[in-house]
Image (cartoon, rainbow, N blue to C red):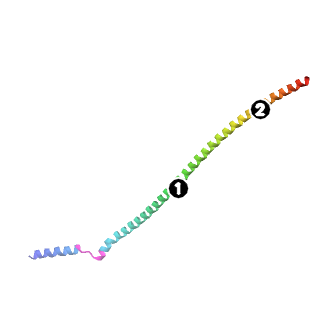
Amino acid sequence: MVKRIFIILSLISLFLFSACATRTTIKEELTPLSDRMSKIESRLDALENKINTLSSDVESAKQAAQEAKTVSQDALNASRDVAKRAEDAAKMAEDAAKMAENAAKRAEDAVSKAEQASKKAVKTFELQQKK
């Protein structure tokens, strides 16, 4: 029976001494974990800040791209309008050149007719002089 009591007391003391930890021991165990958690939290905060900055930069880039697209579309429309006006001006110039060509031909024809009339007038004058 003494043997049983000794074994029971040994087991109880073993359980009490091995399972119990002092505050100092717990602090010593938790301090490295707390330090690691602090470092991880600061790294997480830094990553969140970078993500927020990048997100803001992406939004700014999207807005700038949209503005550039609008400007380029406006420039394309303006260049098409200028090209249309240039085509119209070229057609008008071509028509004016044709009209000038026709006027020059009519002037040449008029000069030719005037020369023929002048020759007839000279002949008529000469014939009248002879009579």
Q: Position of residue 128 (x, y in %)?
A: 89, 25
Quadrant where the C terminus is found in the figure: top right
Q: What residue is pinned by disc 2?
A: 110
Which residue appears at 91% of the width and 25% of the height?
Answer: 129
Which residue is outermost to the top? 131
Which residue appears at 27% of the width and 76% of the height?
Answer: 22
Quarter of the rendering containing residue 123 = top right
Which region shows up in magenta?
A: 19-25
Structural distance between the alpha carbons of marks 2 and 1:
63 Å
Label 1: few (<14), some (14–19) or many (≥20) C-alpha neighbours in 10 Å: few
Q: Position of residue 36 (x, y in %)?
A: 36, 67
Q: Is residue 96 above or below residue 60?
A: above
What secondary structure is found at the residue carrying circle 1? helix
Left or right of 72, for residue 106: right
Which residue appears at 29% of the width and 76% of the height?
Answer: 23
Q: Earlier in the sequence, mark 2 or mark 1?
A: 1
Quadrant where the N terminus is found in the figure: bottom left
Q: Is residue 98 magenta?
A: no
Q: Position of residue 125 (x, y in %)?
A: 88, 26
In front of the other: 47 or 67: 67
Q: Is residue 9 above or below residue 55?
A: below
Left or right of 13, for residue 107: right
